[in-house]
Image: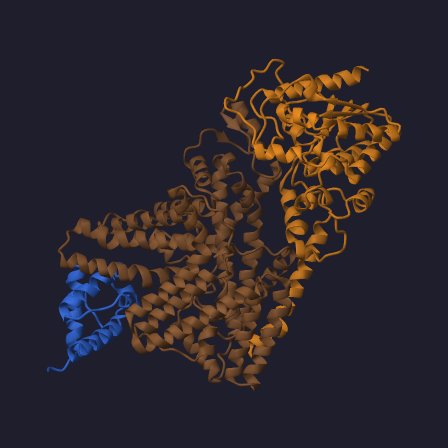
Amino acid sequence: MSELIRSDVLQDLQQVFRSVFNDDHITLTESTTAADIDGWDSLQQIKVILACEKKFKIKLRARDVNGLDNVGSMVDHLMSTIAKTTRQ
Amino acid sequence: MSEWTKFFAVRLPVAILAFGLAIEAAAALLSGVTLHRHNVDDLASAVMHDTRPYRTVLLGDSVTHMVATQFRIGDADEVADLTTHAYAGLPSELFLLKRYLESGHRPRHVVLAVSRHLFTEPMDNATFSYYITSVFKLPNERAFLQRYYSEYVNYEWRPAALSMTTTVGEPILSLLRHPGNQIWSSPERPSPNPSLEHIPGYSDDEGVFQKILSAPTDIRPEARAVITEMCRVSQRYQFSLHIVWAPLEPRLRAALIASGAVPHIDDQLREIFRQNQTAASIVDSSDRQDYPYFDHALIHIRGLGWEQVYANELAAYIHDFEAH
Amino acid sequence: MLFTDPKFLFLFLPFSLILFYLMRRYAGGKSTIWFLLFASAVFYGYWSVTYLGLLLGQVLVNYLLSRQLSRSHSMGQLWLGIGFNLLLLGYFKYRNFFLENVGALIGWHPHLTALFVPLGISFHTFQQITFLTDVAEEEDEVPPLPEYMLFVMFFPQLIAGPIVLHSQMGGQVSAVAAGKRPQEGTFGPGFALFCFGLFKKVCLADNLANFVDSAFQWPQHLQFIEAWSAAIGYCLQLFFDFSGYSDMAIGLGLMFGFLLPFNFNNPLAATSITDFWNRWHITMTRFFTLYVYSPLALATSRMASERNVQAFSAFWLCIAGPTLVTFLAAGLWHGAGWTFIVFGLVHGIALTINRGYREAKMRQLPTIVAWLLTMITVLIGMVYFRSQSMTQAHSILKSMFIPGRLALPLWADSVAQRLGLPVTFYSVFRAANFAAHDLFLLLVFAPLAIMLPNPSVRPKEIRPSYRTAFAVSAMLWLTMGWIGEPRTFLYFQF
């Protein structure tokens, strides 16, 4: 089983954002927050979550929609969920 | 000492004290300002400065005030309109009259065009200070209020900062207003034959109706004191006192007569006049004229034209009094 | 007990504070927690000992439930727990409303005795539901019983919020229990914030009350200006009352060393209805967003993407639907009555329109237009919220938007008559000149509502300067001058 690399997850997440927000110029770093991306509110967050579910083949929960402050914590959460899913 | 400790030990107490003293000083500086917040204020000062020799003084509550403020009652300079409203009540009628007389005026007639409930209902605690206590501050007025309206007044000293709006705010606002020192009289005369509005679908609020019907009908002691005092000044200053009951909604009036409320109140007043050996007359404006439309509280006349009718009626009564 | 009650201000509060600090210093963390619980029980029990028993019972049941959930993480058990709490809330708050309406449908008119709604039940029930959910979803762990009880019953937020999540407070409580050194510098800002809230409630909200109450007592007689004044007056009154209460709650929390979440952030400056709900009763918005809207929206969005639902239907399924459902629930949460349901519906519809507008990427409106639209929507909601019946609400709204006759205050009436305008008298206000006084209040208070600062957002930034001292002393003088009979807080019926 390949090791999960943080930067890969970040890259994939960036692709998700670019597609959801329809903006190829979006660049994500660990510290990007909602304030840095135009229109990233709880509504768009749902779309991001769904897209992440498709991309990473995991299932996310409602509280993930609003609980995360920045991209870094999103990546944390994604990685732990992916790890949990592959363990099952 | 940490910053917050310094705050509570020094800065806050100093600020509280300084603020209190500053307001106290401002209030003292402004204590000489004649207040002009509302028409009772304006009248309280105008009666002492207007020198015109009015033949009749008209006192009354808002039923009459709303009419007199729009349409001049009687001829020019004939009637001094000292009408106020129920929240200023009988005390305002008495004190305005006394101030008027004590400033040298000698009217021949004083007409009290009020509603009966001014004699039987208690005053409103929330507005008493605004319309009465803070207006009438002469020693004899304070003594009267303290004696007969003690539950509404509090003459104990309080720091001015505890009532900033009254001690500082109101005088400052009064300085901005210049109502002039004359008793107001409308430039407009009521038309002798006004076109009368008819309001289709008019009806009384049954709840209000029943509430008024079941109201007490005994004249309150403080009202008794006011009338007694009016009798006394009528003898001293040699004028005739007249009560003209303000219009009452016809259906309500019929019910109040049937229940005995109206005769009972009139009888009590006649008794007071008799005891004070004052030959005051009591007439009811609804005897001569029906006023069909009233507001939801069944107090004020509604409908265009009907107010002018009342203005004409009042003038007619006054001319009647003056003729005899 | 009310925060504005002299017994609270001069007896309960000083004593609790002194004893709290003494116990924290000399008696250890655990005893301090028990003391705070005791004080909170006294605070609640002062109103009713019976209902204090009910509260304690509910808290204990929820604690046992949470222990069970922390072992099983069963969704089924979670729903049972939520059901228990909602049933309890429903029984006291909605029983009569439910029975009346069902009865009306089937022609049965039961004679219902009025049920007294336990103080704060809406708030602490929701707070406990969040904890059950968090535990079941493995987001949180169950603390020892006294700490859990304090989380629910801590008297500053017990009666009317803010709705605190356990994640926000649990750590603070266990720090106290463990006897850790207290946070520095919270008492001073707490005191200043408390004074500010007290001022807003006593000097601002209560001064509007007379006028607003009169207007809503005679709704069928309100004319154009009166109707607008009543709606605006109530909006201001509710804002000052509730944000003042929240400031007092947060200030009290700080005086005891606890940081509670802020509830208001200048809502009357909001430029969209979405923005408004991010600034008004923030902890409630957060509750409904986290625990109602998001699960619904996520579920429907999943369904929509699985079935490839097209954009337009997707909007209705994934955005409009969850928004309307959430706000209907939020409206109903405020009170058992059709006016509250319609209040929720008004906001739900407005939010849906707002979201739709944004989704359709339409041109952004100029700020002032956006603000006006938002405020008008809020005012319409407020009319429903305050009115005692739907008929009353509609008669006020009709006067506001379809005025038949132009009505002017007494002192302008002669002008209007001369101009030949169709007029009627201003019949609601106490006396002609009081109307001017009340209008003046509105003109002064409305800008205040927008311009007053929000120290509850970052209370630690309150400095112990002379400027603060003068502000606090001005507020104290004004408050002491006006503190007469304590009026209940508007949000107390919840």
Q: Quadrant of the N terminus of chain C?
A: bottom right
Is residue A59 left or right of C97 when viewed as pictured? left
Residue C330 visible, this angle: yes
Locate residue B163, reporting x and y percent.
66, 53
User: Which residue in the rendered view is the most extreme toward the left?
Assistant: A1
Q: What's the residue at 62%, 34% (across, down)?
A: B210
Residue B133, above or below C488: above
Residue B13, above or below C141: above
Nearest the eye: C82 or C247: C82
Name the colour scheme. Answer: by chain
Locate residue C125, reporting x and y percent.
43, 64
Nearest the eye: C367 or C259: C259
Image quadrant where residue B79 sits: top right
Q: What's the residue at 70%, 21% (across, down)?
A: B285
Q: Colour of chain A?
A: blue
Locate residue C179, reporting x and y percent.
49, 85
Residue B164, above or below C195: above
Nearest the eye: C295 or B103: C295
Is residue C223 left or right of B85 when viewed as pictured? left
Q: What's the residue at 56%, 48% (across, down)?
A: C209
Image quadrant where residue C380 sits: top left
Tell which chain the image draws in brown.
C
Is residue C324 left or right of B26 when viewed as pictured? left
Residue B189 visible, this angle: no
Locate residue C6, reporting x and y percent.
64, 63
Tell which chain the image draws in orange.
B
Nearest the eye: C258 or C145: C145
Disc tally is 0
Q: What's the residue at 70%, 49% (across, down)?
A: B30
